Amino acid sequence: MYKFFLKRILDFILSLVGIVFLLPFFFVLVILLFINNDGMPFFVQKRPGKNGKIFKILKFKTMNDKKDKEGKLLSDAERLTKLGSFVRKTSLDEIPQLINVIKGDMSLVGPRPLLPDYLSKYSKQQNRRHDVKPGVTGWVQVNGRNGLDWDKKFELDVWYVDNISFFLDVKILFMTVIKVFKREGINVADTAPIEPFQGR
């Protein structure tokens, strides 16, 4: 009952409360990022949701769009702004995803939505991560995040799909808050980039 009914209700209520509570801070960040990123405070990208259905994920933009002499984007480290680094380290870039949750594209807790290019590369077992809505945070994010290889990440995603419960979601949300305050597992400019998933 929780998985098919109550989870969506709690997602909607908690996300709405979160947006109302964070609204003043949200507007300040929008203004600062608008100035910092040449009028583009948001980052929008297509991601696969439940059953692989494509939706547009919304995040705060942490990198500018500066290019080299050949017209190619500079590296992530070169494009990450000081404000963007702070926003990323504190996971504030994820706040706009509460809008995705209210719309029903995402859940507060679930497997993180990856790139559409990966859809054709999953094994049947790995693809089960799309049996549920993707989350703002998930079991992977509180169990190693970027320190895990792809096989372990997918193993944890599928484990979550098979073990969804109210108490598990509460545990993940609580652990996420702790990790955000400790700034564990956050991608910043001086970390090695995550290797793209190549498939099995």
Image (spheres, helix red, strand yellow):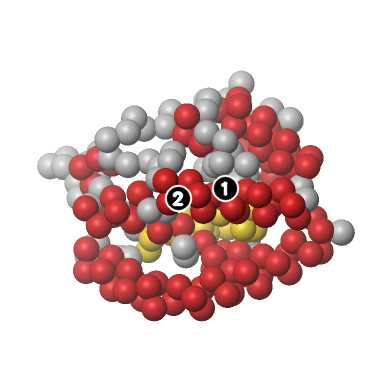
Residue drawn at x 60%, y 53% is 173
| Dot 1 alpha-carbon crowd within 10 angstroms: few under 14, some 14 to 19, many 20 or more | some
Q: Marks 2/1: CA distance?
A: 9 Å
Q: Which residue, given by chain and number where applicable, does mark 2 sit on?
A: 180
Residue 121 in sight in this render: no
The residue type indicated by label 1 comes to Met
Q: Which residue, given by chain and number where applicable, does mark 1 sit on?
A: 175
Query: Which residue is at the front of the view, 45 or 179?
Result: 179
Where residue 41 appears, as percent x and y from the top left, is 33, 65
Q: Is residue 114 left or right of residue 73?
A: right
Residue 195 in sight in this render: yes
Q: Is residue 89 left or right of residue 198?
A: left
Query: Which residue is at the front of the view, 42 or 168?
Result: 168
Residue drawn at x 59%, y 74% is 16
Query: Which residue is at the front of the view, 51 or 58?
Result: 58
Q: Is residue 97 left or right of residue 190?
A: right
Residue drawn at x 32%, y 33% is 191
Where residue 165 appears, as percent x and y from the top left, is 78, 50
Considering only vertical position in the picture, is 144 above or below 100? above
Where residue 112 appears, as percent x and y from the top left, is 57, 46
Residue drawn at x 62%, y 48% is 172
Classify mark 2: helix, strand or loop: helix
| Dot 2 alpha-carbon crowd within 10 angstroms: few under 14, some 14 to 19, many 20 or more | some
The residue type indicated by label 2 comes to Val
Which of the marked residues, 2 or 1, is nearer the chain's N terminus?
1
